[in-house]
């Protein structure tokens, strides 16, 4: 591949595209408008209130602003690493912080971002390297992976500020990587770990550099990465799209689990597919989109559990049917984050409701369940039974990968709750607050949501529009809501279908009101054959037993009492524990040793995100409840 080391900066045109975080490029300028446009574009502004806003604010203050970014920069000054992944921490934290800033642009965070970029760029070597690996170990282990996060962070800063110095530093990093690979005759898919997926996930920032600089070499390198995927030593992310993600390569031994042999590594695989979607936007090659859609569906069908995430020991393992069992290192937060990010990519690209459904379930369960109540810390793994234990420090950095990564998914939510489209707007997530965007006619539209969802299923959406305009307002009807009702200004709307958007096309005017009522009945789920396990959901929220709540010991065998149609009556209760968000009581039949059975008992359940989640203790909890085996059945 011909490598040109000189950057050719020409005048950039103002073009509407989205940045690497899904944000609108307001300060930045781009040279290339991707020929494939997204169906949905994020809101220009969001002001949230209620429970979700409190979680965002906690993370903003206690994780984003509290981070000592100088410590994250320090490894880039040393150039003495051979195997660890210190290079990822700055970029993960920074892209989280950049997302937080697009949601709430405070001067304090802006100063932090600017200082963090300035400090990082100061470590760049004359040839362009920003990394921490010793010269003899470069390109190996996690070196290229770390460079990816450097570029993503620098590009995110450029998108916010238009700072050419940041974009130039990212371009120099990219140019030096291409030069090294060419001079050493190295294939990127043979570098690092996990069949080259960690290294070749650098595809994402290379596509973004092409959009922002117009330099063809970045697009050509992106195409070369995908070509190498399909070589004998590559991860074959295109040709294996129809193969279940947990079965694409022979399972490595325990000793080789985290090496190049592991082709089922969940986080890295999805990161590559994020980059492939960006390349699809640039090339319009239908196969790329089909491959990602097919793989996403396969992950949902074979891996994603009731809490909205999956993977064990950080790898896909065909785990969906096994989720009721105790599983080692289950549901890594980095996997949850990347599942949400990949689903966000597909949501804005296609506008399909199933992606919003998946995001919502993962957000309220696996993601918030991994976040410490005050937002200061994130669990590395979040099992469906057991304890939420603190993750260990990695690479001497004072934190681990999930501490840095958790907010990257959290802060995708505010500006995607309501999004703009060519036809009007779409309400994806029901979160109390106001959302500002533009109508197809260019008028200012404010969508105001009044709700305590998902504590209840009642949502009021007020339209604030000074000038009447005809457009479509799409309302997502979650797939789990079997009975939903929608009214506009008191008049019922027909054609309500679960798992789809209800497109309401009319002339909207100031103070028009949509009333939405969702089905919040407790639903009982079953899994397994011998034994059978039961779990309960309410709306998008998984419920769990917790040893802090009333009821028999967690080891008790309890059968939920249903109405015969798979639903259980849930009565709201107020918890004395400030760390528990929602509590309900329900009736269960306990194990009996009499001929006539035992009297039903009342058992309290709480939302999964609160289960076992405290500041100073680690209570035991359980989602899946084992049922008695009866040989007569």
Image (cartoon, rainbow, N blue to C red):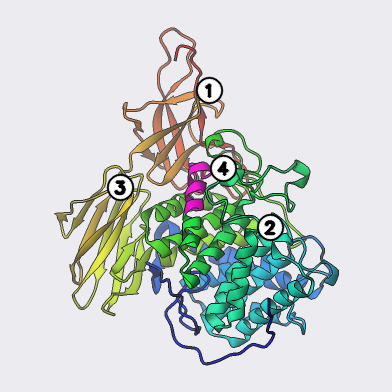
Residue at 55% from the left image edge and 62% from the top image edge = 407
> Range of the magenta residues?
294-311
Q: Which mark is residue 530?
A: 1
The quarter holding residue 138 reads bottom right
**Residue sitting nearer the eye, 485 or 305:** 305
Of badges 3 and 2, the one in the foreground is 3
Marks 1 and 2 in Cβ contact (< 8 Å): no
Q: Which residue is mark 4?
A: 612
Q: Is residue 171 visible?
A: yes
Q: What is the spatial separation of the Cα atoms under label 3 and label 4, in whole angstroms? A: 32 Å
Residue 412 within the segment the image draws in magenta? no
The mark that comes first in sequence, 3 or 4, is: 3
Q: What is the spatial separation of the Cα atoms under label 1 and label 3, in whole angstroms? A: 32 Å
For mark 2, give the secondary structure.
loop
- How far across and down, in percent of the image, does residue 39 sit? 37, 67
Q: What is the spatial separation of the Cα atoms under label 4 and label 1, in whole angstroms? A: 27 Å
The mark that comes first in sequence, 1 or 2, is: 2
Q: Which mark is residue 498?
A: 3
């Amino acid at each position: 591949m011909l490598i040109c080391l000189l950057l050719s900066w020409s005048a950039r045109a103002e073009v509407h595209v989205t940045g690497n975080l899904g944000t609108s490029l307001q300060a930045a300028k781009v040279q290339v408008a991707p020929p494939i446009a997204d169906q949905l574009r994020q809101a220009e502004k969001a002001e949230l209130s209620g429970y979700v806003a409190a979680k965002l604010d906690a993370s903003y203050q206690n994780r984003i602003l509290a981070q000592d970014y100088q410590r994250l920069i320090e490894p880039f000054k040393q150039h003495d690493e051979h195997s660890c992944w210190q290079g990822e921490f700055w970029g993960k934290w920074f892209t989280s912080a950049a997302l937080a800033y697009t949601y709430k642009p405070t001067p304090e965070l802006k100063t932090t971002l600017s200082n963090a970029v300035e400090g990082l760029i100061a470590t760049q070597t004359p040839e362009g390297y920003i990394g921490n690996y010793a010269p003899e170990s470069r390109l190996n282990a996690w070196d290229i992976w770390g460079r990816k996060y450097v570029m993503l962070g620098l590009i995110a800063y450029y998108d916010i500020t238009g700072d050419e110095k940041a974009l130039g530093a990212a371009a120099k990093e990219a140019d030096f990587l291409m030069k090294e690979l060419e001079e050493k005759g190295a294939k990127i898919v043979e570098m690092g770990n996990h069949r080259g997926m960690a290294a070749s996930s650098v595809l994402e920032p290379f596509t973004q550099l092409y959009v922002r600089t117009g330099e063809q070499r970045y697009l050509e390198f992106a195409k070369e990465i995908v070509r190498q995927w399909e070589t004998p030593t590559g991860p074959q992310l295109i040709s294996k799209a129809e193969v279940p993600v947990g079965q694409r390569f022979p399972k490595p031994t325990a000793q080789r689990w985290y090496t190049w042999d592991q082709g089922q590594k969940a986080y890295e695989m999805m990161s590559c597919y994020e980059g492939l979607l960006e390349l699809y936007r640039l090339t319009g090659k239908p196969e790329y989109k089909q491959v990602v859609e097919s793989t996403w569906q396969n992950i949902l069908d074979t891996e994603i559990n009731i809490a909205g995430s999956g993977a064990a020991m950080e790898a896909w393992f065909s785990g969906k049917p096994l989720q009721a069992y105790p599983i080692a290192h289950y549901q890594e937060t980095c996997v949850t984050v990347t599942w949400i990010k990949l689903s966000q990519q597909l949501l804005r690209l296609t506008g399909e409701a199933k992606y919003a459904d998946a995001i919502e379930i993962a957000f309220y369960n696996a993601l918030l369940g991994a976040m410490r109540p005050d937002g200061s810390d994130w669990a590395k793994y979040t099992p469906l039974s057991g304890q939420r234990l603190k993750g260990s420090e990695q690479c001497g950095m004072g934190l681990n990968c999930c501490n840095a990564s958790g907010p990257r998914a959290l802060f995708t939510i505010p500006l995607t709750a309501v999004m703009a489209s060519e036809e009007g707007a779409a309400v994806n997530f029901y979160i109390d607050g106001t959302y500002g965007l533009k109508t197809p006619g260019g008028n200012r539209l404010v969508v105001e949501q009044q709700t305590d969802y998902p504590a209840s299923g009642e949502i009021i959406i007020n339209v604030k529009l000074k000038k009447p305009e005809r457009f479509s307002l799409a309302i997502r009807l979650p797939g789990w809501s079997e009975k939903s009702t929608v009214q506009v200004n008191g008049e019922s709307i027909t054609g309500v279908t679960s798992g789809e958007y209800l497109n309401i096309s009319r002339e909207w005017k100031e103070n028009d009101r949509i009333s939405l009522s969702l089905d919040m009945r407790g639903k009982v789920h079953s899994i397994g054959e011998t034994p059978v396990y039961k779990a309960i959901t309410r709306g998008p929220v998984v419920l769990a037993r917790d040893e802090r709540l009333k009821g028999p010991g967690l080891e008790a065998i309890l059968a939920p009492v249903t109405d015969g149609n798979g639903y259980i009556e849930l009565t709201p209760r107020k918890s004395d524990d400030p760390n528990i968000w929602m509590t309900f009581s329900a009736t269960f039949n306990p194990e009996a040793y009499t001929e006539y059975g035992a009297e039903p008992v009342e058992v309290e359940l709480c939302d999964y995100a609160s289960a076992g989640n405290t500041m100073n203790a680690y209570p035991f909890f359980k989602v899946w409840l084992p049922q008695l085996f009866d040989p007569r059945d």
